Amino acid sequence: MNRIPLADVVKWLQAAGEPSRLRLLALCTEGALSVSDLAQALRQSEPRVSRHLKILSEGGLIVRMRQGQWVHYRVADQAEAASFVRGLLAQLDRSDPVLLRDRTGARAAAAPRAERAAHSAESRLGRAIAGFITASGLSEPRGAVLVIGVSHPELLECAARASPRCTAVAPSRRAAQAARAFAERRGLSCRILKGAGVELLGDADTVRLGEAFAAVLVDSSAGEEAFARTLQRARGLLAPGGRLWVFERYESLEGSRERVVEHPLARLRRLLGDASLVCERLSPLEADGEHVLAAVARPLVVAAAAEAGAAGPAA
């Protein structure tokens, strides 16, 4: 039997220890649901439910996944976290009137949305992401391309169209299967791997990849510490002259009652700088109820050399 570190158990208890978040966990065990579905089920506003989902996600109890133009939430794949959730919910009376009402509301909300999703075309956010990638120069990379994270399949498609040597790392077996199915439907040639650990890109993944990449695309919704580690590892995988594209989900500041300590744009610039990356372009993308920061960066040394070359020899 695996022994779980005390810090992990405390983190899970803190994330789940609130009535609305416990109700959300119960719903997420029954299937993948969107923010709108969950907000309708709990009869709460979407911004409020989004904040609860962010806490559960950062606590490692649920994961986000993209299905067409919708973002859905379900219980985490990680075995220890999933076991904790099952054990916790086993203590609940599932015939409780509140939980019964939640389930009924979630089913009512999800049914018409699922029917629409079956016939939906490419999402507006997907088009915005693809447009940003194209406009910022990912068209003919002279080498292999790596995609880290597959929440937005548009990144995978752009990478595979740009280079015949495309590799993607998915955070879970289910995400890898979904990415392979998407690639097959689109006729894309891309090697898709399941990540070796719980992080989006771990040290074991960097060793397994075993090559340098002309372009690396990072698709992240992780917490700050995990995201910072991913940026450091991604930078280490860049070939000389390579560039890094970053797509990070963030919470809208509109309607938030929380004090904003650091603006999301400034935060991403800081994290790129901490990873010795120079930000060339940074833009917020907002569509389909999602908010994503998109950035392009180069390694600091390469950027400095390019500036020195442009300046020419000193007089």
Image (spheres, helix red, strand yellow):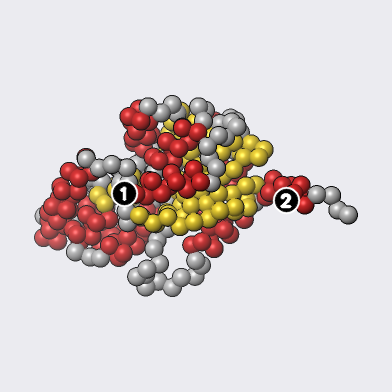
Q: Position of residue 214 (x, y in %)?
A: 59, 36
Q: Where is the N terminus found, in terms of image quarters? A: top left
Residue at 76% of width from left, 47% of height from top? 309
* Element carrying mark 1: strand
Q: Is residue 77 visible?
A: yes
74 relative to 251, above or below:
above
Q: Image check: 293 left or right of 109?
A: right
- Residue 246, position as x, y percentages in the image: 51, 48
**In the image: residue 111, left or right of residue 314:** left
**Can you give x and y, in whole percent of width and height, for residue 90 in the image?**
21, 50
Numbered circle sitting on residue 61: none
- Percent of width and height locating residue 250: 42, 58
Q: Amino acid at mark 1?
A: Val
* Image depth: mark 2 or mark 1 in front: 2
Name the one closer to the observer, 75 or 150.
150
- What residue is disc 2 on? 307
How far apart are labels 2 and 1 at the CA level? 40 Å
Which image quarter holds the C terminus?
bottom right
Query: Is residue 275 among what the camera can see?
Result: no
The residue nearer to you, when weighing 199 against 34, is 34
- Contact check, label 2 and label 1, Cβ < 8 Å: no
Look at the numbered disc 2 and give the secondary structure of its residue. helix
Looking at numbered disc 2 in the image, what kind of residue is underneath it? Glu
Single out the residue that lies furthest toward the right.
315
Looking at the image, tell me whether mark 2 or mark 1 is earlier in sequence order.
Answer: 1
Res. 71 mark:
1
Q: Residues within 10 Å of mark 2 (few under 14, many from 20)?
A: few
Residue appearing at x 36%, y 37% in the figure? 175
Q: Quadrant of residue 19 in the image?
A: bottom left
Residue at 24%, 56% (x, y): give it: 36
Going 14% across and 56% down the picture, which residue do you hit? 105
Label tally: 2
